[in-house]
Amino acid sequence: MKSLNQLVLLLMCAAFFACGTENGKEEATAEETENIQTAVPAEAETPVDAISYQESLKAGGMKFNISTTGMGSMRNLTVVAERDEQPSTRIDEAIEGSVTNTAVTDLNQNKKPEVLVFVDSGGSGSYGQLYGYEFEREYWGQLKLPELSPALQKDYMGHDKFEVVGNRLVRTFPVYLDTDPNCCPTGGKHTIVYTLDNALNLQVEKVD
């Protein structure tokens, strides 16, 4: 009788462990399924080399292909200058913001074309930046835009606009009074007129 009870007890233990093993298999299977589901990639992100701006301009017997790649705050600017039967010249530069406009001009009137690239930093300030290059055959030089004077910086909160008027570069931006929110400047605007010297320095001609 004792042997029979022991046999029954052994059979019950075996059944219990078998159920536990089966449940463990089911739990593992569920966990594996969950892992597989979470491993499915989300919708593909925009490639970092996606073109976000592209423009072609001509001047002085040259063609300029201007483009940026990237969609975030940091992008890569490329300027390629092409001449008939001459090797092309390529400039690559990291910029912060997006290109709003481009222009080809000759501000210093030395018969060497300049490419101007106007950039908006985005965000609430939308601070304007200028990237400029002068080309001569396979050589090029970079234009230098001076910092705003302390008096102008006092009222400055971005939202710059650049344009070429004749052989001058004109920059305008709103004037913010101390209590003005970013959306609503009430102090009018400043206009700065720049000339370009042969050393490629933009010089302030006048401020209104």
Image (tube, grey):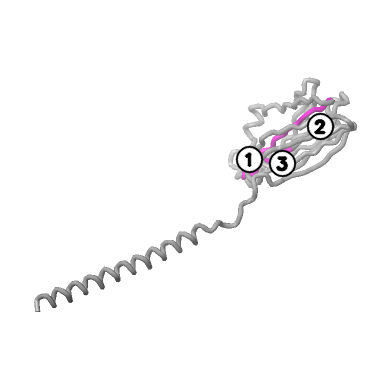
Q: Residue at x 70, y 26 (%)?
A: 146
Q: Residue at x 31, y 67 (%)?
A: 21
Residue closest to the far top: 199
Measure the C-alpha gap from mark 2 to mark 1.
26 Å
Give the camera-side residue of 163 and 176: 163
Circles 3 and 2: CB distance less than 8 Å?
A: no
Q: What amino acid is found at the position of numbered circle 2 in the picture?
A: Ser
Determine which residue is flagged by label 1.
Answer: 74
Dominant SS of magenta comes to strand
Kindly state the secondary structure of the residue where label 1 is placed: strand
Q: What amino acid is found at the position of numbered circle 3 in the picture?
A: Thr
Visible in this render: residue 208?
A: no
Disc number at residue 88?
2
Kindly state the secondary structure of the residue where label 3 is placed: strand
Determine which residue is flagged by label 3.
Answer: 68
Location of residue 20 (image quadrant): bottom left
Location of residue 188 (image quadrant): top right
